[in-house]
Amino acid sequence: MSHETAQFINRLQIGFLTAEQMPDLIALDPALPCLVRHGRGRLLCASRNVAQRVHQLEAEGDYLRDVSIPATECETARSLKHS
């Protein structure tokens, strides 16, 4: 994880992402795992694939609950903040 990605993650509200923040995250780290919680469960996918997966879920009649950075990635970002 780059220092810039760690800074971005550390600014998030408890690791949750908004649609407006996704382009910045994708530009920083398109492969960063994101947790997508939806009506039927949850899944992990690369940040660059979140919009596509949400569109697919909605096309299947499901709904998006939220998108966040997994706790392990947040811990990594916090550890870089203090290094």
Image (cartoon, helix red, strand yellow):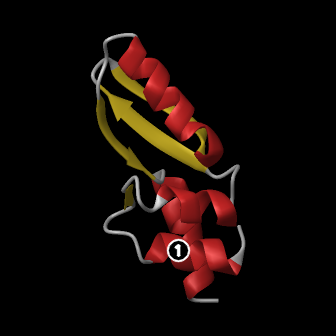
- Rendering quarter of residue 64: top left
Q: Look at the image and tell me whether residue 29 can be seen.
A: yes
Badge 1, how many Cα within 10 Å: few under 14, some, many 20+?
A: some
- What residue is shown at x 40% (from left), y 14% (from top)? 59
Q: Is residue 10 above or below residue 65?
A: below
Horizontal side, residue 21 vs residue 76: left or right: left
- What residue is shown at x 55% (from left), y 58% (from top)? 23
- What residue is shown at x 27% (from left), y 22% (from top)? 39
Question: Going by the picture, which residue comes out furthest to the bottom?
Answer: 83
Q: Is residue 56 above or below residue 64?
A: above
Position of the C terminus by quadrant: bottom right
Residue 28 placement (x, y as % from top left): 67, 66
Q: Look at the image and tell me whether residue 78 can be seen.
A: no
Under tag 1, what secondary structure? helix
- What residue is shown at x 31% (from left), y 12% (from top)? 61
Amino acid beneath label 1: Phe
Tally of numbered discs: 1
Q: Which residue is mark 1?
A: 8
Residue 31 placement (x, y as % from top left): 70, 49
- Rendering quarter of residue 20: bottom left
- Rendering quarter of residue 24: bottom right
Question: Going by the picture, which residue comes out furthest to the top?
Answer: 60
Residue 40 placement (x, y as % from top left): 32, 17
Position of the N terminus by quadrant: bottom right
Horizontal side, residue 28 vs residue 7: left or right: right
